């Protein structure tokens, strides 16, 4: 009986074909994980218009920075060196919480952006001496920690309007209710979700920074009705989220005739509140890389962990930590003018 003989060349060709097929599939098929990718910082001036305002022609500018997000391909997951420079691989559950679709996440980010635009305009106009009418209407849930009991009852976008039987219109009022509780106590919350009013009871947990302080485990901002004395239009297209609040406010203030950038390329990130305080945001590694790509002179970031992360990836970029809008204005005023 004759035996079928396979030549070594045929084996090599077959192996090479299978390897090429594997690489092709891995390079074109998406995994469940996401990649956070740096995006070059861009000027805000073309995205913001203020009634009667003007942009100084001094060669500088206010810059905002975003982070690109897409599904990681299997080959990028298996071979990290193929990932774009400055990117980070993030598991799906960190981007899209359980029970929530990516489309729902994007829709909420758009709502957050709209609110951020209004708040930024209000803060800037008020800092410039204009009278802005604001009426707080509740506390928005911007995020819920995945490892707290409240994760089963609260969702991003919920608006808390009552706590422990008391009306809640501001973050300060919510904190006052929680200050009377001990970690482990439960608190009843009244929520607006869509067109419904809901009642939920959640168990508090210990604050990671103060074991005696009770927290729910949520990040919040204020929901408010805002009436501006001047028309302000801010449009970043499909970009969502609240992290461009600080550059929005700086640009509005600049178009009111204030020389904010002093001829410098000033990049900024940070969620802004009605009282002008600046809250931390995500993606500081990628944002810092994006600001460096734009050759900005300085990068204003929320103080604390955000600033620490930005410094790790800053290279020669000057990082300026800020806690409030007025502090940002004071710091920029002290910088050498170009």
Image (tube, rainbow, N blue to C red):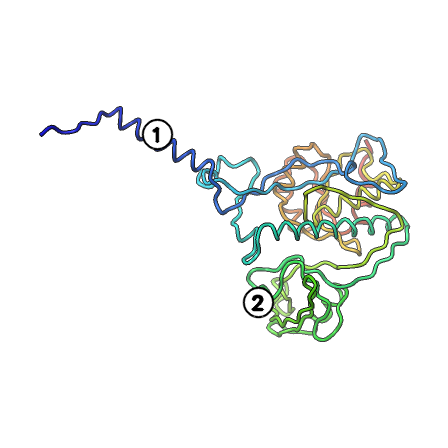
Who comes first in sequence, dot 1 or dot 2? 1
Q: Position of residue 272 (x, y in %)?
A: 75, 51
- The relative height of residue 281 versus residue 162 in the rendered view (above or below) is above
Q: Quadrant of the N terminus?
A: top left
- The relative height of residue 65 versus residue 209 in the rendered view (above or below) is above
Q: Residue at x 53, y 53 (%)?
A: 93
Determine which of the numbered discs, if any, sits on residue 253 in the image: none
Q: Residue at x 75, y 59 (%)?
A: 222
Q: Secondary structure at mark 2?
A: helix
**Nearer to us in this view, 108 or 45:** 108
Q: Residue at x 68, y 43 (%)?
A: 238
Q: Quadrant of the C terminus?
A: top right
- The relative height of residue 122 versus residue 264 in the rendered view (above or below) is below
Per the image, the residue denoted by label 2 is 149
**The image quarter in which residue 192 lies:** bottom right
Per the image, the residue denoted by label 1 is 17
Q: Position of residue 198 (x, y in %)?
A: 67, 69
Q: Position of residue 76 (x, y in %)?
A: 48, 38
Image depth: mark 1 or mark 2 in front = 1
- Along the horizontal axis of the image, is 186 left or right of 162? left
Q: Secondary structure at mark 1?
A: helix
- Along the horizontal axis of the image, is 127 left or right of 297? right
Mark 1 crowd level (few <14, some 14–19, many ≥20, 10 Å Cα): few
**Nearer to us in this view, 124 or 330:** 124
**The image quarter in which residue 227 lies:** bottom right
Q: Position of residue 283 (x, y in %)?
A: 62, 45
Mark 2 crowd level (few <14, some 14–19, many ≥20, 10 Å Cα): some
**Nearer to us in this view, 98 or 263:** 98
């Amino acid at each position: 009986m004759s035996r079928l003989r396979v030549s070594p060349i045929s084996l090599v060709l077959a192996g090479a074909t299978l390897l090429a097929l594997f690489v092709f599939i891995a390079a074109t098929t998406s995994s469940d994980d996401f990649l956070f990718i740096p995006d070059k910082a861009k000027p805000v001036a073309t995205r913001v218009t203020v009634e009667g305002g003007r942009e100084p022609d001094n060669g500088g500018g206010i810059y905002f920075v975003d982070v690109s997000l897409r599904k990681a391909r299997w080959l990028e997951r298996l071979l990290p060196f193929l990932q774009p420079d400055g990117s980070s691989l993030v598991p799906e559950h960190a981007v899209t919480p359980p029970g929530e679709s990516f489309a729902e996440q994007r829709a909420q980010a758009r709502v957050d952006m709209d609110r951020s635009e209004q708040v930024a305009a209000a803060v800037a106009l008020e800092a410039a001496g204009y009278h802005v009418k604001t009426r707080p209407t509740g506390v928005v849930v911007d995020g819920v920690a995945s490892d707290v009991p409240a994760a089963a009852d609260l969702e991003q976008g919920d608006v808390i309007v009552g706590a422990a039987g008391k009306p809640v219109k501001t973050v300060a009022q919510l904190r006052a209710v929680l200050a009377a509780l001990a970690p482990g106590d439960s608190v009843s919350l009244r929520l607006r979700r869509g067109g419904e009013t809901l009642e939920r009871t959640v168990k508090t947990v210990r604050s990671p920074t103060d074991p005696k302080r009770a927290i729910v485990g949520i990040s919040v901002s204020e929901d408010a009705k805002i009436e501006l004395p001047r028309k302000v239009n801010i449009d970043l297209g499909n970009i969502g989220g609240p992290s461009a609040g600080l550059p929005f406010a700086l640009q509005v203030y600049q178009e009111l005739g204030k020389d904010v950038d002093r001829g410098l390329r000033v990049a900024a990130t940070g969620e802004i509140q009605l009282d002008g305080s600046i809250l931390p945001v995500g993606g500081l590694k990628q944002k810092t890389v994006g600001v460096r790509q734009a050759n900005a002179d300085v990068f204003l970031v929320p103080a604390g962990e955000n600033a620490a992360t930005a410094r790790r990836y800053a290279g020669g970029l000057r990082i300026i930590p800020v806690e409030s809008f007025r502090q940002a204005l004071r710091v920029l005023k002290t910088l050498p003018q170009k």
